[in-house]
Image: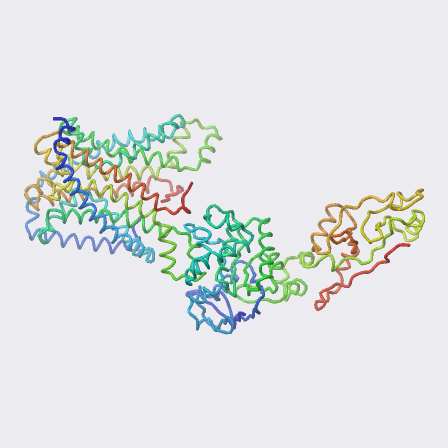
Amino acid sequence: MTTYDFIARNWLELTQLAWQHTVFVGIALAIAIVTGVPLGVYLTFNRRLADTVLYLAGIMMTVPSVALFGLMIPILSVFGHGIGTVPAIIALVLYSQLPILRSTYAAIRSVDPAIIEAGLGIGMTRAQVLLKVQIPMSLGVIFAGVRVAVVMSIGIGAIAAYIGAGGLGQYIFNGITQTFDAMINAGAVAVSAMAILADFLFGRLEKKLVSRGLRRD
Amino acid sequence: MKPKGRRPYFTIFGLAFAFWLGIEAQHRGYVNFARENPREIYRLLIQHLQLVFISGSIAVALGLGIGIVLTRGFMRRYREVTLSILGICQTVPSIAVIAIAMTYLGIGSKTAIFALVVYSLLPIIRNTVAGIFQLDPALVDAGQGMGMTPRQVLFKVEIPNAMYIILTGIRTAVVINVGTAAMSFLVGAGGLGDLIFTGIAMVDAGLMLAGAVPTACLAVLLNWGFERLENLLISPGIPRGE
Amino acid sequence: MIELDRVTKTYPGATQPAVESISLRVPEGEICVFIGPSGCGKTTLMRLINRLIPISSGSISVNGQNIMGLDPIELRRRIGYVIQQVGLFPHMTVRDNIGTVPKLLGWTKAKIDERVDELLTLVNLNPKSFRDRYPRQLSGGQAQRIGVARAMAANPPIMLMDEPFGAIDPINREVLQDEFLSIHAKLRKTVIFVTHDINEAIKMGQRIALLNEGRLVQTGLPDELLNRPANEFVKNFVGTDRVLKRLNLLKVKDAMMLNPVHCLDDDASEKVLEQMIRQDLAFLIVADRDHRLRGYVNRRDLRGHKGKVGDVAGRLTLTVSPERNLKEALSQMLSYDLGILVVVDEAGHIQGVLNSTTLFKLVGDTYDERGGHWERITAGGRIL
């Protein structure tokens, strides 16, 4: 059976798995943004803490995802959540922190101090400068970080199928067990397609978020 | 960069934490497998290292070569397109690369190495191109003005000055390789992934940790080692902007 | 009105105060320039006023109120603030930039738009074309004009300007300086202007405060610092060419020779020549019946000529307006190698003459600061 045949026949199941995949990647991403962006903003006020946190996040990213799963499961099984979507989401959130934190931190910090001074000088509060100037100016870069996190999460999410999180990786792993090439390919192609599509969509979104005044035409 | 003042705290805290974890693990019997099968672990570790280094060397050689070629003048027309395609390829997850390689090339370490090379090729090429392109054109100009041949300009001016970015790309690629190699177990190439995946399948924490801990340590150590190497190799005069 | 009373600022950990015991009074509607070498504390002093930097000791009052008794944010919204790098918000249009403070104050959109257009016109930028532009689409001069407009948006009575024209090229800088002076003449805000350029200070300032190493060295009218420097430092700071700098402050009309010797165009050539020889004049200005400049004549032109002077008079195109400053006039004289410059008004009527005699006399004479006028020389008038 060719890959094409397989996809044609199992269209429904493929979609279900794709949806599963999207869901837990989506949840992880949402959590990562909600924790990462505010933390990134906060870190711009505390340089020393920033160095530490970014360093730790960096180490986090160095550890390969497979190894992280291997490390997390024993720890989490104590709480009864060793396998399934929970460790997968936790791992994804941890991995997404670095790109999101780093791009938020870098973008907010990169705002020209003269602009901040001008804002304060004309009578804006520090919070107003942050909310009305720094953050709007940084949206594009922050989103670039989110985009990296998304693409990465889709890939790691595929591996998470092995620990019972579901998603498209399931076709890959089941296909290996059953030596079913078409299934393996279907899974691999689907995951790749999802990653490429997400990269493209988020890329467009990123461009849209960059203020017209900041574009480098 | 690691916060300099904090180094002693980090190391002490890190070691203490690892120590505590070790005791806990022992307590729960996680360490048993490791203690009973050191040679097995060692064998898989060596396999893993082989995979990483063989594929790494090939990827570096190829990547640097292709990258440099892409920056040359005659490639101008194809550069944009090539880089765009590379960009798209880079979004493909590692597991997919391995899976597809397997369906077309069968199983075995050769397939694994092929997949690993393909996956780590892209960051190296991109960084090489980026590194050479971000150079101040005045440097090349000065070199040519002094009478250097194009090849001399390449080796004596462009590459040394682009070194920081290129080495960073190599470091990233190799460290990612450690992770991807952990999945080559699926292709029948062994490596520490064997322990991790088997451990998960059999719900055996001891196996999992026996595989995961060395893999994680390997990745972190290689990363640290490469950073050191970068510091040594790169002339202090070169800006390490980021 | 701004009043500084023994204001001192010492940064934590510093051995020397950045600003030491400075007392100063800036009357309402006046431009006061803070000037001094790098590190003298001029910018620090300015930023103490809007509380961007906290004061160490002493007090500052604005319109009678001690600034410490006011909410700093409120205070800053009532003070216009312009900095050298402009600091326009790149992600906002010109309109949104200018309207920042009004928006914070809760003005209606209509009111803000009206005010934006008003201000753009005031700074000589066409509202229609600039309203919706982004800062990156502006030149340096345009950007700083908008910076000034933004500072004035909520119509603050006081403005603090920190080297606002420092990053602009010299040609545009002059234009901006002139424009600001004309805006100030209309609006009469109290302005503190920081600069390191003595020429700018002399031009812009109605009062100059010269600082050095955190202390106030001398304050006064620009000409006071030039004419009566308090010590060696001031003398050196204003420049060894201070006499020439004074030329900047004076107008042609203040120094010209009045009633210059001349003849009329229908006077007889022989008679005029006779007088020229008797008075030992090499050449002479020719005027018409309405006292307008017709030209000039040499002795050579008149020799042997029988008829009216007007027939042989050569054209004299190099003239100067009485309103120009003396430095420009001198420059003109030197560049054209003229010993003399005729001063004419817009209609061409002769007002006087500038020559080396009058200028040297000017330099040497005492200056009556109350009158503001040099004692001008009056010459003989019509030669016949």
Q: Quadrant of residue B76?
A: top left
Point out residue C60 in the picture as x, y percentages from the top left corner.
49, 71
Q: Quadrant of the N terminus of chain A?
A: top left
A52 or A152: nearer the eye?
Answer: A152
Give the percent coordinates (x, y) of residue A199.
27, 39
Give the residue furthest to the front. C110
Compared with C249, C318 (above or below) is: above
- Give the residue displayed 39% in from the left and 33% down from the top: B158
Q: Closer to the camera, C265 or C319?
A: C265
Position of the C terminus of chain A by quadrant: top left
Q: Residue at x 21, y 41 (%)?
A: A154
Snapshot colouring:
rainbow
Q: Which residue is drawn at the image coordinates 32% and 35% (left, top)? A: B126
Residue at position x 46%, y 59% in the image? C111
Q: Is residue B209 above or below residue C52?
A: above
Number of residue marks? 0
Query: Which percent across, then down, holds residue C264?
Result: 87, 51
Give how far across and how far down residue C192 sits, in percent. Answer: 54, 63
Q: Is residue C279 above or below residue A158?
A: below
